[in-house]
Image (cartoon, helix red, strand yellow):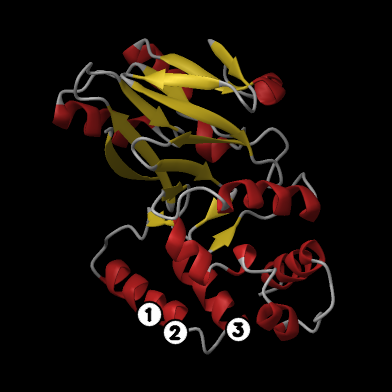
Amino acid sequence: MLDLVTIPCLADNYAYLIHDPATGQTAVIDVPEPGPILAALSARQWQLSHILITHHHDDHIQGVDTLRERTKAQVLGAAADAHRLPRLDIALAEGDSLRIGAETGAVIDVSGHTLGHIAFHFPQSRLLFTADSLMAGGCGRLFEGTARQMHASLQKLAVLPPETLVCSGHEYTASNLRFALTLEPDNSQLISRVAEVAEKRAQGRPTVPATLAVELATNPYLRAHLPALKTAVGLPDAEDVVVFAEIRSRKDKF
């Protein structure tokens, strides 16, 4: 099993370290800034071997070159996004695999927030790194892709084992759940999650990662197929992707 460390960066970003105790190999997923990541590595006396990039937005990659220079780690990212990423040592596409120590991870195309956005799934350790695709209580804004693309991407993730830990890229959970409550005010699991998130934030603790089971029970973007949610947005007979698009549109104006 890989060790996991959640690292707050910038104003509301997260990077993640994963570490294989048997081999000592250590990867970081996204590099919003190098300082907190270097501090976390130093505190644990870990040597960085891999830098995994999910997508090209500056708040996920702007520290990559500095971290590469300091650690000599290999940089991996999407081949489809390579023209706007830091220089890649290994270019990846959906269906490719990568190894961190003894564990093999899978690359999943989750285009929607951006084109070429990828997620990393490590099934043995039950870890899923989604950045700005599937987020805690929400999903990323559709800057480049379409609602149909994002809906298809999230459907790939929704069928993973429910105990999977979803490691997303931002501390947006409280605002995402406030919006979710406008759609499902009587969802008891959602109400409980709102209270839990408020308590964590009051204590200065991250609200990520969260299990996929929690997301399936409370995240409206994974629930667009449910009759109650379709009715809540006034589209009782619409196909799921149309309901998803309506939910995303409402969140953009929330």
Give the percent coordinates (x, y) of residue 96. 58, 21
- Counting residues from the start of the chain, the first of labels 3 and 1 encountered is 3
Q: Which residue is mark 3?
A: 182
Inspect the image, locate mark 1, and give the three-letter code of the amino acid beneath it.
Ser
Q: Is residue 28 above or below residue 168?
A: above
> 161 or 223: which is nearer to us?
161
Foreground pick, 156 / 3? 156
| Disc 1 to disc 2: CB gap under 8 Å | yes
Position of residue 6 measured from the top left corner of the image (x, y, whole percent): 31, 44
- Quarter of the figure with residue 171: bottom left
Residue type of the residue flagged with mark 2: Ser
Using the rendered view, name the quadrant where residue 92 is placed. top right
Quadrant, the N terminus: top left
Mark 2 lies on residue: 188
Left or right of residue 91: residue 129: left
Element at label 1: helix
Q: What SS does tag 3 mark?
A: helix
